[in-house]
Amino acid sequence: MPSWGGSKFALSTYLARRVRRMMSDESAWRRLPDDVREWLEVQKDHSAIVSEDEMLAETFPLGKTPLPSSAIRSRGASRTPPWPCC
């Protein structure tokens, strides 16, 4: 889910596809705002930029608790059932 300034916004299926295509095409980055281009460059340097039909799931160490995940593309995290803790 793309976010800007800490708030998320909904994307239509077609707009989401265009955003994924633009993110995966490095030559398109020059048309993006400087801060977005910088974020994509940092992402590329430290991890990966996936193609428009792939999904990247990254996790970061958080003690010994595993991170549950789900590939639900149609709902925001606040609308999905809560995960059991511990």
Image (cartoon, rainbow, N blue to C red):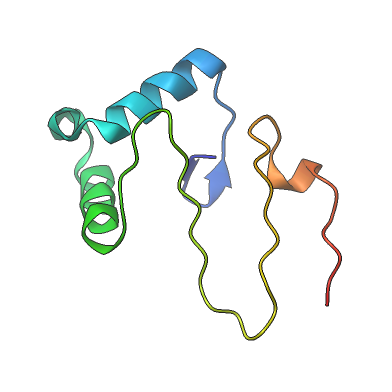
Name the residue at 82% across, 59% down: 83
Residue at x 30% of width, y 45% of height: 49
Q: Quadrant of residue 80?
A: top right
Image coordinates for residue 53, horizontal then vertical, percent: 42, 28
Considering depth in this image, is 70 or 78 the residue closer to the camera? 70
Query: Residue placed farthest to the bottom in the image?
Result: 63
Q: Check the picture and name the quadrant holding the C terminus.
A: bottom right
Q: Is residue 46 shown left or right of residue 53?
A: left
Q: Residue 10, image x and y in percent?
A: 59, 29
Query: Residue shown at 79%/41% (left/top)?
Result: 79
Q: How many marks?
A: 0
Quarter location, residue 47:
bottom left
- For residue 19, side relative to residue 58 (left or right): left
**66 left or right, relative to 1:** right
Image location of residue 46, percent across then percent down: 27, 63
Residue 71 drawn above or below residue 61: above
Instruction: For the N terminus, give its image quadrant.
Output: top right
Q: Is residue 47 above or below residue 74?
A: below
Q: Position of residue 48 (x, y in %)?
A: 31, 52
